Image (cartoon, grey):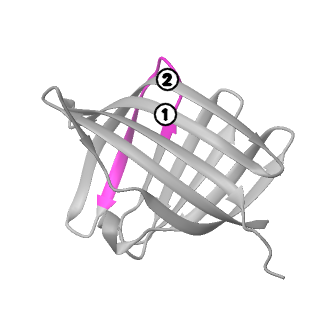
Amino acid sequence: MKDVLITINSIQNLDGEDRFGPELITQGTYDYAADGARFSYMESPLTGLDGTRTQFHLRPDEVVMSRRGAVNAQLVFHQGENNRFLYHTPYGALTMGVNTHRLEWRMDEHGGEMEIEYDLDVETSHISRNKFKINVREKELKS
């Protein structure tokens, strides 16, 4: 596992209007293997998920995002598929779904980039179209 800097940019489209989320830059860990990559980080109070660890596991044809802590969920992004999951919060659980339209990632032993575009629904009601771009890069060593 390597220490990395992770930059996350997101856009959420609600009722035809794009809303850009704040750019989040955080520290995390990263591991690369021939069959994929993994990275994780602790959520910031800015995201409303303080106390939650988010982990991405990138495989050739899918990305699995797991959250553990204040909220618990496992989302599977597979292009062209609609995947359902339970989103557990301190107030109860919701059935949600992600319909992945585009999934691309380019990672190597030093990090890389990932982009995912998907529709989100809650209890089968469409909520938004979302897009996020994540950049993972090794932390520079200080001399």
In this picture, which residue range is highlighted in magenta?
A: 76-88
Which residue: 41% across, 61% down? Answer: 72
Q: Residues within 10 Å of mark 1 (few under 14, many from 20)?
A: many
Front-most of 25 and 98?
25
| Residue type, mark 1 in image | Ile
48 to 59, vertically: above or below: below
User: What residue is pinned by disc 1?
Assistant: 116
Place of residue 117 in the rendered image (x, y in percent of width and height, measured from the top left): 43, 30
Left or right of 32: which side holds 42? left
Front-most of 92 and 2?
2
Which residue: 84% across, 50% down? Answer: 109
Place of residue 30 in the rendered image (x, y in percent of width and height, measured from the top left): 72, 59
Place of residue 66 in the rendered image (x, y in percent of width and height, measured from the top left): 51, 54
Left or right of 31: which side holds 52? left
User: What residue is pinned by disc 2?
Assistant: 102
Left or right of 28: which side holds 33? right
Which residue: 36% across, 64% down? Answer: 71
Residue 12 marker? none
18 to 91, vertically: above or below: above
Q: Residue furthest top?
A: 80
Q: Secondary structure at mark 1?
A: strand
What whole-number distance in Å separates the C-alpha atoms at marks 1 and 2? 6 Å
Q: Mark 1 and 2 residues: CB-CB less than 8 Å, in contact?
A: yes
The majority secondary structure of the magenta stretch comes to strand
Place of residue 46 in the rendered image (x, y in percent of width and height, measured from the top left): 32, 68
Task: Indicate which disc, 1 or 2, sits on the residue closer to the N terminus.
Answer: 2
- Residue 122 painted magenta: no
| Residue type, mark 2 in image | Arg
Q: Secondary structure at mark 2?
A: strand
Q: Residues within 10 Å of mark 2 (few under 14, many from 20)?
A: some
Quarter of the image for the C terminus: give it: bottom right
